[in-house]
């Protein structure tokens, strides 16, 4: 186990994250201005595609971090059955759910049941999955890969390990250990899961509908009946983490070129459903 992982196990993860969240939510000019400018400079944030490209137009760091893009910045692939990327980011892993497990890192697998809780239906065994990591400089809104109807969410309290290659290799079941929101959708191509995974200094996971706000105090299962089109926004991270997608077996084929390390942009096709 690396020193970085050991340190995170000792730190008060939630206290640090919520303190960072309070700072990020501040609308005081002497806080928001320097913080936004320093972050944009440190991570090389490209504001050219933002709906509001001027850093001075944001009322808080959170407002800046969860910024919307210009309407034409991310066209949604119009091909029938196209499965589109839910976010800008890098694919950390992709493959097939086998023996009730997903690949976390090379040689390391973790439990699908532990990740998805009551949404881990038998139909997902043998189905495709992909994990997309959102870096600090990325666009941090999450969108739906396929048109569908939200039928259930499960808000799950947990740890807040940072999500990166080091923790993926050093924390067993990382995505099933961290705080997360599991969203189950019914689509024309069977059930689909979109899981938003929290991380260190992720101040909040937000959705476009009313629901439990993170940090999650208790496991909460909620029924829904909400329709969305492919590419519709469904949520956002206030500071970044990862999104895990899971599909019914035999219904979605992810692109052969989609592999660990692949850079993806929201709205572009990453597979096809049939």
Image: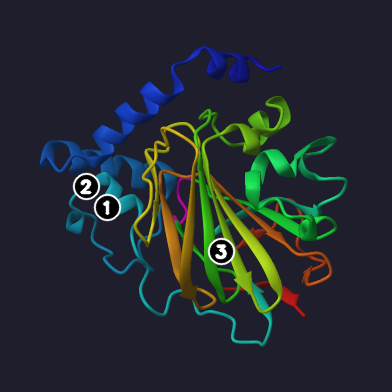
| Residue at 61% in and 31% down | 177
| Residue at 74% in and 76% down | 272
Distance Cα–Cα, label 2 vs label 1: 5 Å
Q: Position of residue 268 (x, y in %)?
A: 60, 73
Q: Are marks 3 and 1 in contact (CB under 8 Å)?
A: no
Q: Earlier in the sequence, mark 3 or mark 2?
A: 2
| Residue at 68% in and 26% down | 171
Q: Is residue 235 above or below residue 4?
A: below
Q: Earlier in the sequence, mark 3 or mark 1?
A: 1
Q: Nearer the viewer, residue 102 or 92?
A: 102
- Per the image, the residue denoted by label 1 is 63
Q: Secondary structure at mark 2?
A: loop
Q: Are marks 2 and 1 in contact (CB under 8 Å)?
A: yes
Q: Which quarter shows the C terminus?
A: bottom right
Report crowding for label 2: few under 14, some 14 to 19, many 20 or more residues within 10 A (C-alpha).
many
Distance Cα–Cα, label 3 vs label 1: 20 Å
Distance Cα–Cα, label 3 vs label 2: 25 Å
- Per the image, the residue denoted by label 2 is 60
Q: Is residue 92 above or below residue 172?
A: below
Assign the magenta stretch its main secondary structure: loop
Residue 6: assigned label: none
The quadrant where residue 269 appears: bottom right
The magenta segment is 136-140
Q: Secondary structure at mark 3?
A: loop
């Amino acid at each position: 186990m690396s020193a970085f992982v050991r340190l995170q196990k000792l730190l008060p993860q939630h206290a640090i994250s919520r303190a960072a969240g309070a700072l990020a939510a501040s609308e005081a000019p002497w806080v928001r201005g320097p913080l936004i400018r320093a972050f944009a400079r440190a991570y090389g944030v490209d504001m050219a595609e933002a709906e509001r490209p001027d850093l001075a137009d944001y009322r808080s760091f959170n407002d800046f971090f969860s910024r919307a893009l210009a309407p034409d910045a991310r066209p949604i692939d119009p091909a029938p059955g196209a499965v589109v990327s839910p976010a800008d980011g890098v694919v950390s892993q992709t493959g097939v759910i086998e023996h009730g497990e997903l690949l976390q890192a090379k040689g390391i697998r973790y439990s699908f049941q532990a990740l998805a809780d009551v949404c881990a239906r038998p139909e997902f065994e043998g189905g495709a999955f992909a994990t997309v990591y959102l870096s600090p400089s990325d666009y941090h809104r999450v969108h739906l890969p396929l048109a569908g109807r939200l039928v259930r969410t499960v808000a799950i309290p947990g740890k807040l390990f940072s999500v990166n290659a080091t923790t993926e290799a050093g924390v067993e079941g990382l995505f099933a250990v961290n705080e997360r929101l599991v969203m189950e959708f019914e689509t024309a191509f069977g059930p689909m899961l979109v899981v938003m995974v929290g991380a260190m200094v992720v101040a909040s996971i937000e959705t476009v509908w009313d629901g439990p706000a993170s940090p999650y105090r208790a496991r909460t299962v909620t029924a829904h009946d909400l329709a969305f089109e492919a590419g519709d926004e469904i949520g956002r991270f206030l500071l970044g983490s990862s999104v895990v997608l899971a599909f019914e077996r035999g219904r979605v084929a992810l692109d052969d070129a989609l592999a660990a390390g692949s850079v993806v942009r929201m709205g572009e096709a990453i597979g096809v459903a049939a």
